[in-house]
Image: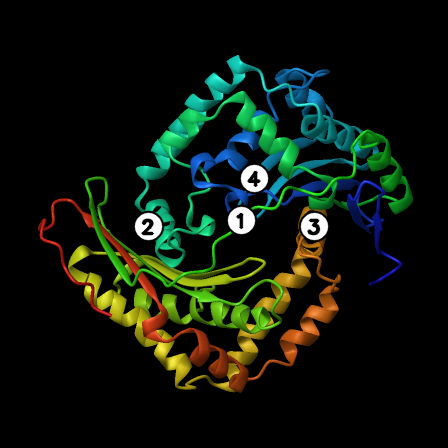
Amino acid sequence: MNQNKVRSTTLDNGIRIISERMPWVRSAALGIWVQAGSLTEQPRISGISHFLEHMLFKGTKRRSARDIALSLETVGGSLNASTGKETTIYTGYCLDEYLPLAVEVLADMIRNASLQERDILLEKEVVLAEISHSLEDPEEMVMDRLYENLFPHHPIGYPVLGTRETVASFSRADLYTYLQQRYTGDRIVFSAAGRIEHDAFVEMVQQATAEWDRHEAVPVPVPDLTAIVPNLFLQEPMAQQAHIAIGAHAVSYLDNRRYTLALLDVLLGGGMSSRLFQNIREKYGFAYSVYSFTEYMADTGIFGLYMACDPRRADESIELLFREIDEIRLGRISQEELESTKSQIKGSLILSQESSSRRMRRLGEQASYNMPYRTTDEVIQIVEAIGIDDLVSLAQTLLNRSQFSITLITPKTQSQKKRRIKA
């Protein structure tokens, strides 16, 4: 760890604190990372992590929802939050002099949420509208169904938003119990980057969390990862194009091969210079939108590709996607292409260091997974050491056609007959 810039501390209540000093900026970015997401939910309460995230902005014993909204906005800052498969993140961005306020407000939201019945009823309408919107977006829908197919009957496959039925069923007791069981010191990280002093930041967090007891979260039984659903064909009236998502199980966040997979991701679908863009969009003109993606979790990961195209081109498009993967598996990568991809990743890493928010997120993410902190230079060294053989070996291990699940959504106006997806 770079002791001059990045420091970490663990409080007696189990909360971990990590910060990076950037003396040349006037901002401070704060994140509170809670190990609560769809992975920590049971089917009956699917979506409760996301719903609780909404509810924590609705007021505390000391602050109304308006007080929370205005707390940082009136001094030029902002508050936000997001929920994922494994974590819920609460963020504050402000001038460095207002970091104590950001810490105090976010800690108050988490510790002293009022969870009023009236607010719960109102917020259910908001989240139900959000679910309806997601069901009207074919790209979002195909991604949700891909996760379900990759992780059938597993919490990772649950939609982060939950379902209409589960959200409608949430009670105040459900929310309060989940908050008490999941938002425990051993599952919380405070990360910050900007013009801050670590010791002062620790003191802020200590004061804001002084009444938080140290107790471990209630264990959640998680089923073993199961076999994937090979393919799924759906027809939806809102779809104007064929939406294709293919994905496979990949390496976890804790696996160093994720840097190799990141290179594969950029090479295949990371921008206008990528193979997918150049070959499928520019050469064949099959798609306006085509890209690859990765997601890393504690015990697994996902590598996937997405494409939207003319429904009449769906089978050809799927074949083109797999053909690009096969090219990698066969070792058809030039040294020039590898070096160009590395430069793209290195440039992105270095540019991200100019943002206090991006640095805060790197710190919080690594700490949430109990990973030792790696500087940008250390990550670049890892990337530089990756060779073509490493890319090919990983592709041959993870990216066989039989290991992929295919999800395809086409317009309802197509033939209603079920079809077999070619792969």
Task: Locate residue 75 relative to residue 408 in the image: left or right.
Answer: right
Q: Which mark is residue 364?
A: 3
Tell me the quarter of the image containing the C terminus: bottom left
Residue type indicated by callout 4: Ser
Residue type indicated by callout 3: Gly
Residue 164: image quadrant is top left
The residue nearer to you, when weighing 337 against 392, is 392
Task: Locate residue 51 relative to residue 15 in the image: left or right.
Answer: left
Residue type indicated by callout 2: Val
Q: Position of residue 301 (x, y in %)?
A: 50, 62
Q: Is residue 234 visible?
A: yes
Q: Position of residue 344 (x, y in %)?
A: 57, 68
Q: Which mark is residue 142?
A: 2
Give the Cα separation between the discs numbered 1 and 2: 28 Å
The residue nearer to you, when weighing 241 against 90, is 90
Q: Earlier in the sequence, mark 4 or mark 2?
A: 4
Indicate whether 335 appears above or below 300.
below
What residue is drawn where x is 78% and y is 39%? 214
What residue is drawn where x is 62% and y is 65%? 254
The colouring scheme, among rainbow, by chain, secondary structure or one colour, is: rainbow
Q: Are marks 1 and 2 in contact (CB under 8 Å)?
A: no
Q: Position of residue 336 (x, y in %)?
A: 52, 83
Q: Residues within 10 Å of mark 3 (few under 14, many from 20)?
A: many
State the SS at label 1.
loop
Q: Position of residue 356 (x, y in %)?
A: 72, 48
Mark count: 4
